[in-house]
Image (cartoon, helix red, strand yellow):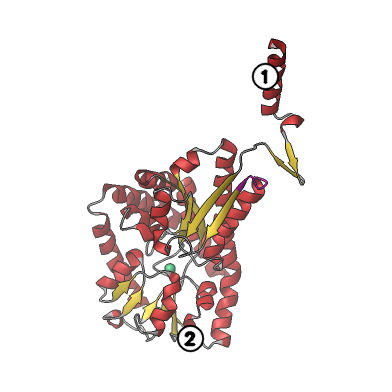
Amino acid sequence: MKRLLAIGTFFVLVSCSNSEESIVEDQGCFSNGTKNYKWTMVTTWPKNFPGLGMGPENFSKYVNEMTCGRMQIKVYGAGEFVPALGVFDAVSQGNVQLGHGASYYWTGKVKSSQFFTAVPFGLTAQEMNGWLHYGGGMELWEEAYEPFNLIPLAGGNSGVQMAGWFKKEINSLSDLEGLKMRIPGLAGEVFTRAGAETVTLPGNEIFLSLQQGVVDAAEWVGPYNDLTFGFHQVADYYYYPGWHEPGSTMEIIINKEAYNSLPDDLKAIIKYAAKSANQEMLDEYTARNNKALTELVEKHDVDLRKLPDNVLVELKKITDEVMEDFIKDDPMAQKVYKSYTEFKEQVINYHRISEKAYIDTRELD
Ligand code: CA
């Protein structure tokens, strides 16, 4: 009997190593585990929405592929399982294991969360990825979400957005007075101080609100997404640039207990699947925005305009005031803002003579 036990122990040890016996073969797929995981991911986006909604779909697909189906993630669109803006609570409370959205929707709960999506006149997509992954941003994001039982990961980026859809022309700052606009986050506060009335609405409520005159203007993302929602049917002027969201990062949030229950290989797969989904979204926008913009202008006669420099200068001044007040009573927001600002100052310095100088060079005749 003792000998049999010893032999048994031997095989258990062998099966934990990388020997052939440890590998379970299933349709050309190799998996080193036997326990299956069926997880749920709720999102703030309509199901399968181009760009944003593909973030969670791609993440789920990559995890499924890399685990040979050992971990399956069912993705729910906004309102299918929880409302769009109920994602944070659902994951934090452990009702579901995963969420996909944008951290600035939770500014009311975690002030510093604003910095992990976008800051007016702040970092671009490339710069955000640099700050998050090599500039200390991720560590701060983890610290900010720690009290909420959440682990954050970057899960997509829109690139520079558009300033938005307006029913009337914007020629000076006074044109913002009394304007009702859908514009969330810090930019909403900037517009409020400029005299506008601002609201935060989930994407799927914007069209009707514009159409019915609940709002006179709205920003959403950029040409690729805005064309899908058909905003050109209800507003004439399409303004750029996206001063308010220069490179919005999307988030994947994981319930901490659920994450800690995973074996190390699945933890690693989740991390790298998120990194892939993060880059993939930016690639999709980079490839599709231009095509959509051409369609909006050439097929739908959209009046494309740049916000006048005098308006942008004023918005920038107001942004500085808003930032000062925003962080005033929140030590964590101050800490994150300091890190963000220091990184921005350094990266701007280099991008002035690299990205910007190069793009300017490309425009030369
Ligand atoms: Ca936006």
Q: How far across and how far down the image is residue 214, in percent?
A: 34, 81
The residue lying at 25 percent from left, 63 percent from top is 321
Q: Is residue 59 above or below residue 298?
A: above
The residue lying at 54 percent from left, 84 percent from top is 297
The answer as to whether callout 2 falls within 8 Å of ligand 1 is no
Q: Nearer the viewer, residue 208 or 339?
A: 208
Camera sees residue 126: no
Specify the quadrant that holds the C terminus: bottom right
Query: Label 2 is placed on what type of residue?
Result: Gln
Q: Relative to residue 192, is residue 217 drawn left or right? A: right
Specify the quadrant that holds the N terminus: top right
Camera sees residue 171: yes
> What residue is pinned by disc 2?
233
Q: Give the magenta part as a residue range.
A: 67-71
Residue 70 among those drawn in magenta: yes
Q: Is residue 141 above or below residue 11?
A: below
Query: Label 1 is placed on what type of residue?
Result: Thr
The residue at the far top in this view is 2
Disc 2 crowd rating (10 Å Cα; few below 14, some 14-19, many 20+) is few
Instruction: Identify the image quadrant of residue 184.
Output: bottom left
Q: Is residue 12 above or below residue 192?
A: above
> What residue is pinned by disc 1?
9
